[in-house]
Amino acid sequence: MIKRTCLIIDNEDQTEEIEKLVRDAENSGIHLECHQFNVGNTGYSDILTEGLIDITKVVSEYRKKFQNQYFDIIAFDWDLEDENITGVELIRKFTENKIAKLSPKLVYSGVLDDVIKK
């Protein structure tokens, strides 16, 4: 069986989606280990400053949780409900801070039509 790892970066809990991804991967002969990193969620205020995403804290928390871990893919939500940081901007910040340099990154959105209009 093929083994793959992924990381979902979102401001909302993606546990149900992750369970579906893991189940669908198993059906395709892939053992998927999928993690999530909640960025921008007020329930995880340790990486926020005044209710907004604090990149310095995000970088520090990422390094604590996922230090030296390779992911086959990292998926960033476009809409992190922060007026200054989108998934694209977060990818830029990861690149600037040399985080997950070798992992492919993509942006996804549950509100794709709205994103395209912007």
Image: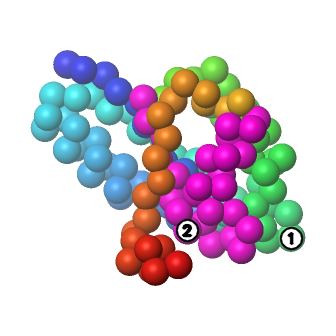
Q: Position of residue 53 (x, y in %)?
A: 75, 61
Question: What is the quadrant of residue 79 in the picture?
Answer: bottom right
Question: What is the quadrant of residue 32 in the picture?
Answer: top left
Q: In this image, 91 relative to 4: left or right?
A: right
Residue positioned most to the front? 117
Above or below — where is 49 with respect to 97? below
Q: Toward the viewer: 41 or 95?
A: 95
Disc 2 secondary structure class:
loop
**Which segment did they paint magenta?**
72-97
Figure coloring: rainbow
Residue designated by label 2: 79
Q: Which mark is residue 12?
A: none
Above or below — where is 85 with respect to 35? below
Q: In the rendered structure, which amino acid carries the disc numbered 2? A: Asp
Indicate whether residue 5 is drawn in magenta: no
Q: In the rendered structure, which amino acid carries the disc numbered 1? A: Glu
